[in-house]
């Protein structure tokens, strides 16, 4: 038996979800809240679960954004190096002609 509270256990389980799983469950939670008919306690539990799932989705999206930014920065750096090499090659060729 663990010493984690049910909320901590739910958070740990949410952290293990992939983006698509968390998003799909979040959509289901929102539908259930919008449909109404739940008790106050059930609605609060759904809201808390929705908040956990939204945090999981945000972390996945932030990670994806960081990977895209890193890839774009690496591409820009690579292009900058190629331009410098072309400029250096052009300057040497121009100097040889004189």
Image: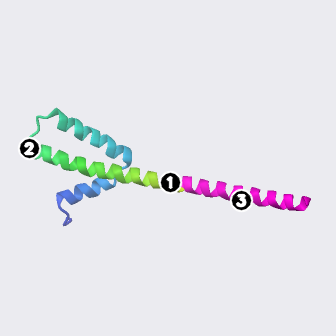
Q: How is the image coloured?
A: rainbow
Q: Is residue 68 above or below residue 27?
A: below
Q: CA distance from mark 3 to mark 1?
A: 22 Å
Under circle 3, the secondary element is helix
Question: Residue 74, image x and y in percent?
Answer: 58, 57
From the viewer's side, name the closer residue of 15 and 84.
84
Residue labelled with disc 2: 40
Under circle 1, the secondary element is helix
Q: Are marks 3 and 2 in contact (CB under 8 Å)?
A: no
Dot in front, 3 or 1: 3
Magenta portion: prevailing SS class: helix
In the displayed structure image, the side of residue 97 where residue 86 appears, left or right: left
**N-terminal label among 3 and 2:** 2
- The local crowd at label 1, few if under 14, some if 14 to 19, many if 20 or more residues have their Cα within 10 Å, is few
Q: Are marks 3 and 1 in contact (CB under 8 Å)?
A: no
In the displayed structure image, the side of residue 47 where residue 96 appears, left or right: right
| Residue at 30% across, 52% down | 55
Q: Is residue 64 above or below residue 29?
A: below
**N-terminal label among 1 and 2:** 2
Residue labelled with disc 1: 69
Which stretch is magenta? 71-98
Under circle 2, the secondary element is helix
Q: Residue furthest bottom?
A: 3
| Residue at 9% across, 46% down | 41
From the viewer's side, name the closer residue of 75 and 22.
75
Q: Residue furthest front?
A: 98
Question: Residue 11, image x and y in percent?
Answer: 25, 56
């Amino acid at each position: 038996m663990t010493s984690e509270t049910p909320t901590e256990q739910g958070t740990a389980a949410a952290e293990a979800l992939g983006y698509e799983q968390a998003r799909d469950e979040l959509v289901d939670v929102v539908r259930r809240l919008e449909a109404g008919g739940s008790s106050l306690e059930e609605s609060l539990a759904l809201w808390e679960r929705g908040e956990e799932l939204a945090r999981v989705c945000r972390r996945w999206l932030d990670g994806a954004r960081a990977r895209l930014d890193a890839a774009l920065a690496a591409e820009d750096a690579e292009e900058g190096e190629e331009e410098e090499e072309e400029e250096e090659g052009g300057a040497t060729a121009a100097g040889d002609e004189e």
